[in-house]
Each structure stands twice: as structure tokens, then as C-alpha cells.
Amino acid sequence: MSRKKRWADYKENEIFSGVHIPRNMFVFVRCDGRRFHRVVGSAGFRKPFDKAFMGLMVKSALSVFKTGFNPILAYLFSDEANFLFKQLPFNGRVEKIDSVIASTLSSAFTLELFRKKGFEGNISFDSRIVLIDKKDIIGYLDWRQGECWRNHNNSYAYHALIGKGKTPREASRTLRNLKFTNLHELVLKLSGLNLCKTPEWQRKGVLIYWERYYKEGFNPVRKEPVKALRRKLMVNWSPPFFSSDEGKRFLEELTKL
């Protein structure tokens, strides 16, 4: 067998490289941090939540917007980032989208963590693609915001128990299958904290999106004032509940294409 024939066979074995997302589909690319509980502990972030950590997540997510990609929005909580796309990069190639967006987020977070904390450990995010109909975008975001709320409640309860001398295994066993009311009472009893009055970004996540606005200008040919449509990136640390009427209207406006 010739060398060229062997090389052709190797190329044909790249069986997933040709997998494409159908055109005109909305897509979420969801990235999750790998073993971030170790990163949080080693880098000295406060537990269960630290705004400095979320600031690094926000800045890293912004790097995806600013490095040639064009997400409609990004929704973040904990170590999770959800990017919504309509115009897909790399002609919709699944392997390229998954690998490059996750690596962009990973490298940006690594650099920012070193700048802020001097931390030199390995940082990585995984990535998955979620095809979504336009009518289901709000439902998806409501689902992830619900996960943000559950993570918020469980994290506070877990660390309240740890603070009272429970081992990680004992704390996890105590919290198994507890409803919000039970978690709320437990945290209030152990630490005096009302879970409904924590910072909004902890309970509802952070939303990054493009805000459209008109900028005043002047047409030198016609010698008349004009308005040009522009857009700028916004970071909302207190987004509405996506299940509310306000939240639905807000997201409908953002995804109006």
C-alpha cells in the first residue's frame, strides 16, 4: 500500500469531523468547568460564593464574544456558561465548535486566574451542543436558572453544615432529597442567613447580551443628522426570573432576529 493511500485512510478515519449542525438552527453551547471545586479551594476563593470568581467567569465568557464568535447571549452561574448562537462558526462543524469555544474559555480563565491570584494550576472546560427551537429558548434558560437556584440553596446548606463540624460525606447525606423549605430552615438555623435575600447573581445567575441603541451622526453628503443603529455588550448581574412575564418579554426582545 502506498503512503498516499495510507494517509487517505487516516483522513477517512476522522469520522466525526464532518458532523455539521443543520443550518438555520438555534444552538446553545454549554461549557462546564472540570473539577472546579479544587480550583476554588486552591486559589483561595470564598465558599460557597465569591463575586471575584464570578467576575473571572464573566470576563472569560466575554472573551468568546470578542474573539471572532457572535453569540446572541450568554447565561452564567457557578462554573457553567451557556452561549446561544444563531450564526454558527466553522460552518456548523460540531467538533470545531465544541473544542474551540471550550479552549477559548479555558485559556481566558487560566490567564485571568493567574493575573488575579497567581494560580498556575490546569484549568479546563468541557463543552456540549444543544440544538434548540426558537420557541424553546426561554424554556431552556428557565431550566438552567432553576439549576442555578438549586445549586445556590444546596451550596449554602452544605457549607453551613461543614461550618458546624460535619464531614463532607455527613453533610451530603444530611442534604439528600431535602426540599427548599427544609434547606431554608436549616441555613437560617445554622448561619442566620435568609436564602431569599442573598445577592441576586447568586440566585439568578449573570446574563451577557447585546444591547441595541441608536447613535447620533451627521451625513456630510446630505448635510443632515442621521441615526445609526449600534450595539454594545451588557453584563447584567441581576437578570429577571426567566419564568416571569418580565423575564419572558426581556428574552423575547434579546432573541428577536
Image (tube, grey):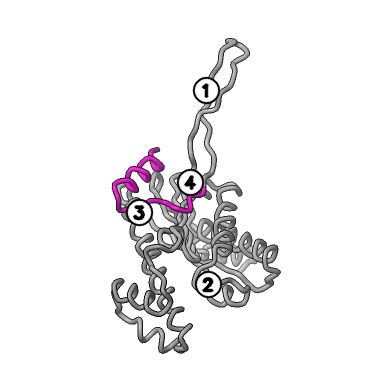
* Magenta region includes residue 45: no
Spot occupied by residue 5 in the image (x, y as percentages of width and height) = 59, 64
Going from N to C along the chain, the mark reached first, 4 or 2, is 2
Q: Amino acid at mark 1?
A: Lys
Going from N to C along the chain, the mark reached first, 2 or 3, is 2
On-image quarter of the N terminus? bottom right
Going from N to C along the chain, the mark reached first, 4 or 3, is 4
Q: Amino acid at mark 2?
A: Arg
Going from N to C along the chain, the mark reached first, 4 or 1, is 4
* Structural crowding at the residue carrying mark 1, measured as other residues with C-alpha within 10 Å and reported as few (<14), some (14–19) or many (≥20): few
At mark 3, the secondary structure is: loop
**What segment is highlighted magenta in the picture?**
235-257
Q: Amino acid at mark 4?
A: Tyr
Q: Amino acid at mark 3?
A: Phe
Does residue 134 appear anywhere in the picture? no
- Residue under label 1: 227
